[in-house]
């Protein structure tokens, strides 16, 4: 069973479109995260939710909106996609304390044309 | 402003030898450090961690060393195996929440 899953794995879309990436974890964790890995392979945190509440919100354009319907899911919605949004997006989850391991999903490769 | 740096983008080692991956950080508030390993088309997987109250942590073939005064940590893999070939990311955090700051990774290639 996949611990952290993301859908879709690949997403190709045109500039200006709106798209969503879904993430689900079956580990019973309280905290979930979204990371972006850009073309330079720099992996950077975007958001984190703990028990459905936003606890980390990095400097991300407000075109990006995370939604956590329950503890096991954290979706990422992106409005008005731009070329610079092309990246690999990783979801992760952890139990939430500082030293708990973060478990990552396989990533979603988003390509904006 | 990159707070965690891995200055070697790649490293090649022969099977059985030691692999040493290095990481430097600039933020003196960081007090928890981790190494993640990543295979192509997969997410990063946790490898080993160290708290700032320690200077060494060992787990099987993997040992992480922390030099706080130099703001430097390293990962030693002994002996290296071909299956260790992957990209290794160093990460650091501080404060109450687990906000990880990652380096740009070092690609390790272990040849038979």
Image (cartoon, coloured by chain):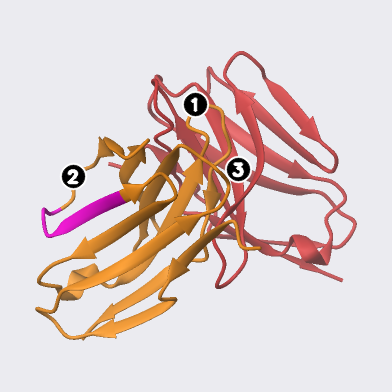
Identify residue for label 1.
Answer: A98
Where the C terminus of chain B falls, by quadrant? bottom right
| Badge 3 element | strand
Q: How many marks?
A: 3
Mark toward the start of the polypeptide (1 vs 2): 2
Q: Compared to B109, does A71 lie above or below?
A: above
Q: Which chain is red?
A: B
| Magenta-tinted stretch | A61-68
- Please say whether residue A62 is one of the residues in the magenta stretch: yes
Tag 1 subunit: A
Camera-near label (3 vs 2) is 2
Instruction: Please indicate, yes or no, whether residue B77 appears anywhere in the rendered image.
Output: yes
Relative horizontal placement of residue B37, taking residue B18 as reference (left or right): left
Identify residue for label 3.
Answer: B35
Identify residue for label 2.
Answer: A59
Tag 2 subunit: A
Q: Which chain is orange?
A: A
């Amino acid at each position: 069973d996949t611990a952290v899953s993301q859908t879709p794995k690949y997403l190709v879309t045109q500039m200006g479109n709106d798209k969503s990436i879904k993430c689900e974890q079956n580990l019973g964790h309280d905290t979930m995260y979204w990371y972006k890995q850009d073309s330079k392979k720099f992996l950077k945190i975007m958001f984190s939710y703990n028990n459905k509440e936003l606890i980390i919100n990095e400097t991300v354009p407000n075109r990006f909106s995370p939604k956590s319907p329950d503890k096991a899911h954290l979706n990422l919605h992106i409005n008005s996609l731009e070329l610079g949004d092309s990246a690999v997006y990783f979801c992760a989850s952890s139990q939430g304390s500082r030293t708990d391991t973060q478990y990552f999903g396989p990533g979603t490769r988003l390509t904006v044309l | 402003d990159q707070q965690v740096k891995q200055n070697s983008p790649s490293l090649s080692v022969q099977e059985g030898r030691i692999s040493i991956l290095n990481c430097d950080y600039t933020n003196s508030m960081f007090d928890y450090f981790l190494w993640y390993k990543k295979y192509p088309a997969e997410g990063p997987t946790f490898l080993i961690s160290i708290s700032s109250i320690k200077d060494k942590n060992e787990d099987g073939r993997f040992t992480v060393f922390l030099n706080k005064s130099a703001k430097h940590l390293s990962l030693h893999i002994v002996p290296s195996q071909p299956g260790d070939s992957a990209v290794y990311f160093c990460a650091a955090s501080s404060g109450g929440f687990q906000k990880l700051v990652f380096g740009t990774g070092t690609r390790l290639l272990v040849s038979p």
